Amino acid sequence: MTPQRRELLETLKLRARQVRDRILRMVYAANSGHCGGSLSAADIVTALYFHIMRINPQDPNWPDRDRFILSKGHSCPVVYAALALKGYFPEEELSTLRAIDSRLQGHPDMRKTPGLDATTGSLGQGLSLGVGMALGAKIGGKGYRVYVLMGDGEVNEGQVWEAAACAAKYRLDNLIGIVDVNGLQNDGPTDEIMPMQPLAEKWRAFGWNVLEIDGHDMEQIVNALESAKDNNQGKPTVIIARTVKGKGVSFMENVVEWHSGAPTDAELEQALAEIWSGR
Amino acid sequence: MSEERRVAISTREAFGKAILELGASVKDLVVLDGDISRSTYTVEFSRRFPDRHINVGVAEQNQMGVAAGLALVGYKPIVASYAVFASMRALEQVRTSICYPKLNVVIAASHGGLTPGNDGVTHQAIEDLGIMRTLPNMTVIAPADGVSLKPLLEQAISIDGPVYIRLTRDPVPIIYDENDEFQIGKAKQLKKGDDVTLIAIGDMVQWALKAHDLLLEEGVTSRVIDMHTIKPLDSEAVIIAARETGAIVTIEDHNTYGGLGSAVAEVLTLEHPVPQGRIALWDTFAESGPYEKLLDKYGMGTDHIVKAVHDVIKRKGSW
């Protein structure tokens, strides 16, 4: 590994700590929200916003920008944190999450929040939006990429698979799906509530290029996203990222009840200490 | 000029012709179909503009989402589907992916009401106008003939926000001249009259006109209004009609709940209450059969309209 590469990864890891810090603080301030799935996606979202995507916070509507769709919309604290840290809006605004008159809705509203490319929150709809955007790039000869982050509970939705087939038909190699496989859905373990494994084989059968990674290993994340971005083989790519729900906070990790809910004063203090102590 | 001069043409077929012209002039127009392109008449568009015709297969939920994605990157998508699928199978996608972010997506929904008669209940959308009308940001129209369809469709693709256009499966008579002007949200008065106003939508406008003639033979003059836009409803036209004729009969190829009758009643109760009669399906599914026979069997034929007028005029005095 080159020194530059090492430095990049270290910078991204630091950014990911900041992102986790902001997630916990904003959900605490709102006294509601979704910590578990935000923390599991924090490293992936950090890599996208701070390294992979061609975006310009000064020009959020730049037509040639890369697009990001948070299909698992309930995890919006992770995206709000990244957007604020990128400078799309002031960081102080994060504490208005879910409050009346706030630009930060309980689920993503692209008409309210600067930097959001899509309105999501009803599971299963984001990949279709991504297909439309990627198709638009193909029709118009544009070079932007479209990234869609899904949950492993979300892929229960039939619409995801309608969209998967459609992306393969139209050879959308500018479309990159990421499944945050944290193993837990709202009611319990995905293997119990609605088993979808073998997930990689399903996507492969639908005509996708599949990469499998540890979704908390920054080097693997960056390598996978870079490889997906440069894939020109006429196939969409999906990155199956194994993650831990609640990652970085011991009492939230792999605990189904932390799908949603806010930490108490004491829990926030402990959680922040753990985020920064570098577990 | 032939084709345009035909006496009757389904509005779905008129739609297929209109998008050919629009495809040539509007470069960012894209059409999405769901494996029914011969029925929705987008098939010729797909031959003429293959790069701008997307066939997603039998998958309406994805179809709405893909249209939304295309709108998000600057295209003007038209989703071609059947009204039952567009308004019900993919309803939440229409609501959350299209209406909530107020995207410029036009949903062209063929097989409205009982016009796909023989196909039976699965393909007869009798709920769509009511359902679509409840969605914030949505505009809802149902052109009465193949001539008015074109200007209304042109406006639909240029206004800000989503538009649902209900089309007929079966032919409807041409009632307009190509020089007539139309505006979404502005009702069209077709006949003058003082005793009662017939407010009709879509394929029912033809029967309102027929009823007008029958009533005239009895000496009853009826104003006839084509309410091609059910949302936003032309409240002014309703209020003026109520004030000037004192009685209204709404005529729609739709369940009685939520559609034109409801929309007009909402205005009347607030602004100018007068007796209202309602021609609609009376909260029942219909069945297979020829379109006109279905209308007769389910209380929506011309004779029923005439009877409804008699009843509503009788009630005038008691108000």
Image (tube, coloured by chain):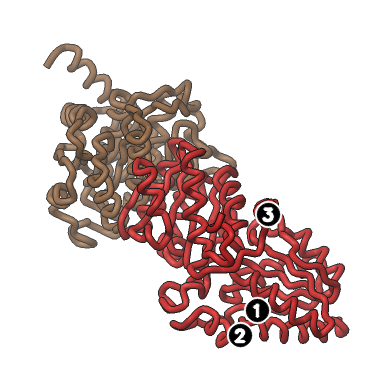
**Label 1 neighbourhood size at 10 Å, few (<14), some (14-19), many (20+)?**
many
Residue at (49% x, 61% y) in the render:
B12
N-terminal of the pair, mark 1 or mark 2, is 1
N-terminal of the pair, mark 2 or mark 3, is 3
Name the amino acid type tagged 3.
Answer: Gly
**Label 3 neighbourhood size at 10 Å, few (<14), some (14-19), many (20+)?**
some
CA gap, disc 1 and disc 2? 7 Å
Secondary structure state at the residue bearing disc 2: loop
Cβ atoms at labels 2 and 3 below 8 Å apart = no
Q: Quadrant of residue A22?
A: top left
Give chain B's shade.
red
Name the amino acid type tagged 2.
Answer: Gly
CA gap, disc 1 and disc 3? 22 Å
Determine whether, in the image, residue A230 is placed left or right of residue B181: left
Secondary structure state at the residue bearing disc 3: loop
Name the amino acid type tagged 1.
Answer: Ile
Mark 2, residue position: B299
Q: Chain of mark 3?
A: B
Q: Chain of mark 1?
A: B
Closest to the observer, A63 or A181 = A63
Residue A117 visible to an observer of this rendering: yes
